[in-house]
């Protein structure tokens, strides 16, 4: 019987830890700098723990824009691994934190410094403006609100936005 699987796939599974490939594929294992999973129970401790600024990416599995944003953060996060910490928060599984942050749509990304939110953006962000936004937040410089950048999609809800039903204001 002839093997019909692509050789590159077989090579990835056979080299090293065979379960590592599947863990990465399913998002159960992260590389340094990639957003680490975050829960309601861990949120306060992680945001106030350490000197580095934190970025929290809020998403939902049903949101296609969130999947794109997650891929962008997986790509750029390792570039800033020694300058910032990145987390991902599934708003469906962690409604308490989503409500506290006042999340009304996803994807959303928040910047935290010393446990306090500094800046946020709702909606998909192109790669270069995302990198610039992360770098400004890491530097702690006075920065213009990302939402007011005319080159980016509007924050106003429309057919392309994914709204979270029942989300409310910060309590």
Image (cartoon, rainbow, N blue to C red):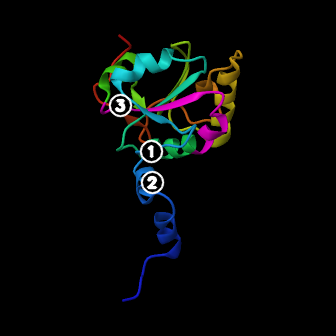
Extreme left residue here?
A: 166
As measured in the structure, the alpha-carbon distance from the residue carrying label 1 to the one carrying label 2 is: 8 Å
CB under 8 Å between callouts 1 and 2?
yes
Question: In the image shown, does 119 or 84 lie closer to the viewer?
Answer: 84
- Residue 72, image x and y in percent? 57, 44
Circle 1 residue: 29
Asked if residue 23 lies left or right of residue 75, the reply is: left
Give the residue at x 62% y 26%.
Answer: 146
- In the rendered image, which quarter is residue 45 located in? top left
How far apart marks 3 and 2 lie (CA) works out to: 26 Å
Instruction: Single out the residue that lies furthest toward the front.
Output: 16
User: Can you give x and y, in whole percent of width and height, for residue 71 in the image?
Assistant: 52, 46
Chain-order first, disc 1 or disc 3: 1
For the C terminus, the quadrant is: top left
Tell me if residue 89 is in the magenta stretch. Answer: yes
**What residue would you read off at disc 3?**
91
Dot 2 crowding, Cα within 10 Å, few <14, some 14–19, many 20+: some
Q: Can the viewer see residue 151 in this picture?
A: no
Boundaries of the magenta span: 75-93
Q: Which residue is mark 2?
A: 20
Q: Which dot, 3 or 2, sits closer to the camera?
A: 2
Alpha-carbon neighbours of circle 1 within 10 Å: few (<14), some, or many (≥20)? some
Q: Residue at x 56, y 18 (%)?
A: 50
> Would you identify the image quadrant in which residue 28 lies?
top left
Q: Secondary structure at mark 3?
A: loop
Numbered disc 2: secondary structure: helix
């Amino acid at each position: 019987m002839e093997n019909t699987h692509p050789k590159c796939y077989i090579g990835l599974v056979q080299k090293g830890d065979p379960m590592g490939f599947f863990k990465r594929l399913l998002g159960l294992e992260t590389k340094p700098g990639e957003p680490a999973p975050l829960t309601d129970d861990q949120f306060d401790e992680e945001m106030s723990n350490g000197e580095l600024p934190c970025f929290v990416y809020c998403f939902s599995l049903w949101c296609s824009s969130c999947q794109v944003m997650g891929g962008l953060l997986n790509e750029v996060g390792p570039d800033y691994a020694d300058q910032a910490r990145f987390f991902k928060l599934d708003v469906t599984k962690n409604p308490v934190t989503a409500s506290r942050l006042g999340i009304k749509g996803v994807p959303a990304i928040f910047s935290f410094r010393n446990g306090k939110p500094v800046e946020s953006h709702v909606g998909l962000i192109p790669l270069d403006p995302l990198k610039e936004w992360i770098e400004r937040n890491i530097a702690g410089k006075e920065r213009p609100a990302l939402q007011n950048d005319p080159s980016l999609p509007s924050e106003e809800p429309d057919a392309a936005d994914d709204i979270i039903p029942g989300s409310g204001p910060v309590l």
